[in-house]
Image: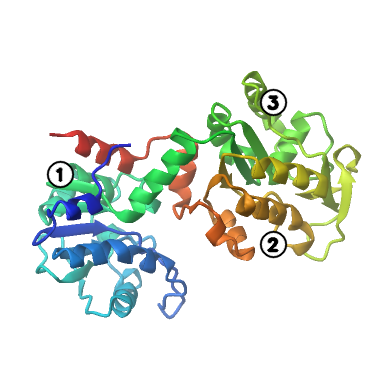
Amino acid sequence: MNVIRFQDLIVQGRVAGRRVFIRADLNVPLNDAGQITEDTRVRASLPAIRMALDAGAAVMVTSHLGRPTEGEFKPADSLAPVAARMAELLGRDVPLVANWVDGVDVKPGQVVLLENCRVNKGEKKNNEELSKKMAALCDIFVHDAFGTAHRAEASTYGIAQFAPVACAGPLLAAEIDAISKALANPKRPLLAIVAGSKVSTKLTILQSLAKNVDGLIVGGGIANTFMLAAGLKIGKSLAEPDLVGEAKAVIDAMQARGAAVPIPTDVVCAKTFAADASATVKAATDVADDDLILDIGPQTAATLAAQLKAAGTIVWNGPVGVFEFDAFAKGTETIARAIAESPAFSIAGGGDTLAAIAKYGIEKDVGYISTGGGAFLEVLEGKTLPAFEILARRAAQP
C-alpha cells in the first residue's frame, strides 16, 4: 500500500518549521479519581511526537477519550491526565488547549495537546466544515492512531482529505506493513486462528479468510459450531446451531482450495462453567449430553502446534479455550507457545489475544501485536479501512 510516511518527510527536510497535526490514540483507561491506570497508548504515541519535535516542527496532538457528547464538554472528558503523563514522559511542558478548532498558538520546537476531539460538533459524522478548519491548522497531518483507522471521522479522515500533506505516522505505518506482510504478501503456508464465543460475530472474517488461508483454526464457541457442522455432539456447550450451514460452507470453501479447517479430535469438558470445575479430557466423539466443552484437548493442541511451527505466516485472533480458568487454559497456552517458537511471521490482535500474550509472556516472540481491536477485525474481514484509503489517495495525488 503506497502512503506518504512521516519518516520520509523528515528525511526529505520537509518538516522543520512546519505546523504538524498528529492524530494519536490516547484513549487510556481512567479510575474514578481520573487517574490513568494503564499508559501504553500514551507511551506508544511518543515516537511520532519526538520525531516531529526533533525535526523542528510546531506540534499539535489530539485524541478522543471515552464517549463524550459532542458540543457538551465535561471535566470527565478532559485529556488533562494525558497531558500531565505526556509531560512526565517527554520531560517538558505539554500545555492542554481547549476550544482549538479556530486556531492554535504553537511555535516550532513546542508541543501542545488539543482537548478531546470528540467533543467537537461534527467529529463523528466527518463534517466537512469542521474537517477544513482542522486542516487549516496545519501544514502536515500525521495519522498515527490505528485504533481509529476504521472510522471516517473529521480528525481521522476529513482532515486527511483537506490538509496540505497527509501521511502515516510510525505506528500506523507499522500496522500497514504488518498487515501487508501477513495478508497481502504472505509467506506460505498461511494459517489463521479465529476464536471466540460466536460464529455470528466473526462470520464475515471466517468467510474472507477462507478464500486466502491454507489452514483455518477455529476455537472457543466458534469451534463448537464447526464441530456440529462436522456431525459431532457437543452436549450443552456454547454454540449457534442455526449457523451450522454457514460453518459447513466455510469448510467446503476451504476444501475446494485444498485447504482445511481442523476439527478438534479431543476436548476438555466440565459439567459447570466455573474456575474450580473438574476438567475431563475426552475424545471429540465421546462428549456427553451434559458436558460443556471449555478447551481443546492435548492431542488436538499438539497437532495444531506442529502445524503452527511449520507455518510461514500466522494470523491470530482469539484464545481457543476459557484461558482465564487454569484448568481450561492449556490449549491456548500450547497454541501461544507454538506461535512464539515458530519461525513464521505472526500478527496478533484483539483484546483477549493480547491478554493471552501477556499471560504467557510471549510479547517479544510475536512478530507484530496489533493494538487496534475493531480496525484489526475489519482488516481480517477484507475491508479497506477509511484511513488507509484516504492516505493512499492523497499519496497518489500529484
| Alpha carbon separation for disc pair 1 and 2 | 46 Å
Residue 176 position within the rendered picture, expressed as x and y whole percent measured from the top left: 38, 44
Q: Is residue 198 left or right of residue 95?
A: right
Specify few, some or many for label 1: CA neighbours under 10 Å numbering under 14, 14-19, or 20 or more: some
Specify few, some or many for label 3: CA neighbours under 10 Å numbering under 14, 14-19, or 20 or more: some
Residue under label 2: 324
Decide which of 265, 374 is in the foreground and name it: 265
Sooner in the amino-acid sequence: mark 3 or mark 2? 3
Q: Is residue 94 left or right of residue 174?
A: left
Sooner in the amino-acid sequence: mark 1 or mark 2? 1
Specify few, some or many for label 2: CA neighbours under 10 Å numbering under 14, 14-19, or 20 or more: some
Please, what secondary structure does the residue beneath circle 1 have? helix
Q: Is residue 329 left or right of residue 69?
A: right
Q: Quadrant of residue 57?
A: bottom left
Q: Residue lying farthest top?
A: 256
Residue under label 1: 162
Question: Mark 2: which amino acid?
Answer: Glu
Residue at position x 24%, y 58% from top?
22
Residue at position x 82%, y 66% from top?
276
Question: Mark 1: which amino acid?
Answer: Phe
Residue at position x 57%, y 41% from top?
201
Quadrant holding the C terminus? top left
